Image (tube, rainbow, N blue to C red):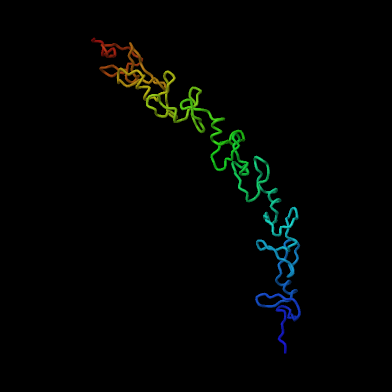
């Protein structure tokens, strides 16, 4: 007696018929497609045993249904991209979603190296210095008036030169007497300390920090012998080619302030009227 060879699902004999094995169990074509065939994402029909099943991220298509959602060209054996559950050929994806080169206005294809700066994109070969036309790549550059310059070209064409060292000022800098300086070049004429952000004054068009200016040029107080800078509204008393800080203009004997008062002199001393009445 011949052993039976039936469909695992419907029990119909499979002798002389096409069948499919699944987990070592035989199925007739109809039962297999009903039970296990994947449904095509495009047409909604089962993908039968005699059809090629193309899959992407747990989704399935008939070979004839696997095409670009926009231009309808076949994607079989071609690169494609997915956007919001739609499959797109590289041309349609690029036209719809890829960046446009700021220089040549053409699409920057997916996978192509691109340069980006402040929301704009360039092909690597289009990202060049406006002056020398050489690729900038990953080197430093300086943008000006919607154009990009490599640092050497920018310095030659646009950078202001420091009045002291004659070299370009590319960042920062200070202006003094309508002339540009590097911060590190704008220093005290005497001690060479940087003056940027510090109080300073000038004599004969040369800049000095307050300390050096006072040491070199300020009059000395006849009372304390310290310099009288006269800067920042500092008040002082002058009498017969001698000067005093306001706080130092006091009676030699009783230390009474003589600012705004009458006084007497005895040789190099100044006295209030009461202390000087016996002179």
Task: Give 197 or 187, whichever is nearer the viewer.
Answer: 187
Q: Which residue lies furthest to the left in this view?
A: 278
Q: Please tell me in which quadrant of the rendered image residue 278 appears.
A: top left
Residue name at image x 63 percent, y 49 percent? 112
Query: From the viewer's perspective, is 168 left or right of 62?
Result: left
- Position of residue 268 in the picture relative to residue 92 (left or right): left
Image coordinates of residue 170 in percent, x first then y, are 52, 33
Q: Residue 192 at what x, y percent from top left?
A: 39, 27
Q: Where does residue 224 sit, x and y in percent of width and height? A: 30, 21
Extreme-bottom residue of the structure: 1
Q: Which quarter of the rendered picture does the N terminus lie within? A: bottom right
The mark tally for this picture is: 0
Position of residue 9 relative to residue 71, above or below, is: below
| Left or right of 101 in this view: 140 | left
Tell me which corner region of the image, top left, top right, bottom left or bottom right, holds residue 65: bottom right
Q: Position of residue 152 (x, y in %)?
A: 54, 34
Question: For the point 72% across and 87% down, which residue is it?
Answer: 2
Quarter the C terminus occupies: top left
Q: Nearer the viewer, residue 167 or 276?
A: 167
Corner quadrant of residue 155:
top right
Asked whether 145 or 9 is in front, the reply is 145
């Amino acid at each position: 007696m011949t052993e039976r060879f039936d469909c695992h699902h419907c029990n119909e004999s499979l002798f002389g018929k096409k069948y499919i094995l699944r987990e070592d169990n035989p199925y007739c074509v109809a039962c297999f497609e009903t039970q296990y065939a994947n449904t095509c994402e495009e047409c909604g029909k089962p993908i039968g045993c005699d059809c090629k099943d193309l899959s992407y991220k747990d989704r399935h298509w008939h070979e004839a249904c696997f095409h670009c959602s926009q231009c309808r060209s076949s994607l079989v054996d071609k690169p494609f991209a997915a956007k919001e559950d739609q499959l797109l050929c590289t041309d349609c994806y690029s036209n719809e979603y890829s960046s446009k080169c700021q220089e040549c206005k053409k699409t920057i294809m997916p996978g192509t190296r691109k340069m980006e700066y402040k929301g704009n994109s360039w092909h690597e070969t289009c990202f060049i210095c406006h002056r020398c036309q050489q690729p900038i790549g990953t080197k430093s550059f300086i943008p000006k008036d919607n154009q990009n310059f490599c640092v050497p070209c920018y310095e030659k064409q646009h950078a202001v030169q420091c009045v002291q060292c004659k070299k370009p000022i590319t960042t920062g800098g200070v202006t003094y007497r309508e002339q540009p300086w590097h911060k590190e070049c704008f220093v005290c004429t005497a001690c060479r300390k940087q003056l940027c952000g510090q109080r300073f004054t000038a004599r004969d068009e040369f800049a000095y920090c307050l300390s050096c200016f006072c040491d070199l040029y300020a009059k000395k107080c006849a009372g304390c012998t310290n310099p009288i800078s006269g800067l920042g509204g500092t008040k002082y008393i002058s009498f017969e080619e001698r000067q005093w800080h306001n706080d130092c203009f006091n009676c030699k004997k009783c230390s009474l302030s003589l600012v705004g008062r009458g006084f007497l002199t005895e040789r190099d001393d100044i006295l209030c009227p009461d202390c000087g009445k016996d002179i």
